[in-house]
Image (cartoon, rainbow, N blue to C red):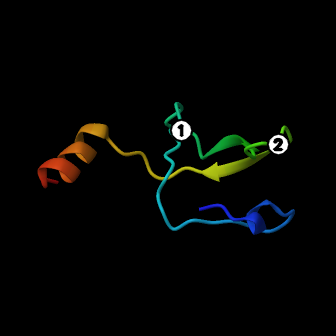
Amino acid sequence: MLTPESFRPNVPWTSDQDDYVIIARDPQASSVEVSWELTEDGNDAVTSGELRVPTEPLVDAADLFKSVFLGKD
């Protein structure tokens, strides 16, 4: 949940929820560049930014599906 304090400059905001998944199309990529935009309801101002996120080890989608939904490794 965003609060007014989250919009102030230089105040980091984090969440312990896994709300976003970023997929790298290049299996050899060591990081992904992410851009974002934030707007406030009733305000035309747009805040935007970019960040670079390191990638995790490659995961096979079929293996992930089996382990999560079928309980098999």
Nearer to the camera, 72 or 9: 9
User: Residue furthest toward the front?
Assistant: 42
Q: Residue at x 70, y 49 (%)?
A: 52
Q: Residue at x 75, y 46 (%)?
A: 40
User: Residue 57 — which label?
Assistant: none
Query: Please, what is the three-letter code of the amino acid marked with disc 2?
Result: Asn
Q: Residue at x 49, y 53 (%)?
A: 19
Q: Nearer the viewer, mark 2 or mark 1?
A: 2
From the top left corner, tell me how far across and down residue 66 is, in percent: 18, 46
Report how many numbered discs are placed on residues in the image: 2
Q: Residues within 10 Å of mark 2 (few under 14, many from 20)?
A: few
Quadrant housing the C terminus: bottom left
- Quarter location, residue 58: top left
Q: Residues within 10 Å of mark 1 (few under 14, many from 20)?
A: few
Nearer to the camera, 32 or 42: 42
| Among the two numbered marks 2 and 1 on one chain, the one whose residue lies closer to the N terminus | 1
Q: Is 3 above or below relative to 37?
A: below
Query: Please, what is the three-letter code of the amino acid marked with disc 1?
Result: Gln
Secondary structure found at label 2: loop
Query: Position of 24 compared to 38: left or right?
Result: left
- Quarter location, residue 62: top left
Identify residue for label 1: 28
Check contact, mark 2 vs mark 1: CB within 8 A: no
From the top left corner, tell me how far across and down residue 4 is, in percent: 76, 64
Q: Is 28 above or below relative to 68?
A: above
Identify residue for label 2: 43
User: Residue furthest toward the top?
Assistant: 25
Q: Marks 2/1: CA distance?
A: 41 Å
Quadrant housing the N terminus: bottom right
Q: Is 35 above or below relative to 20?
A: above
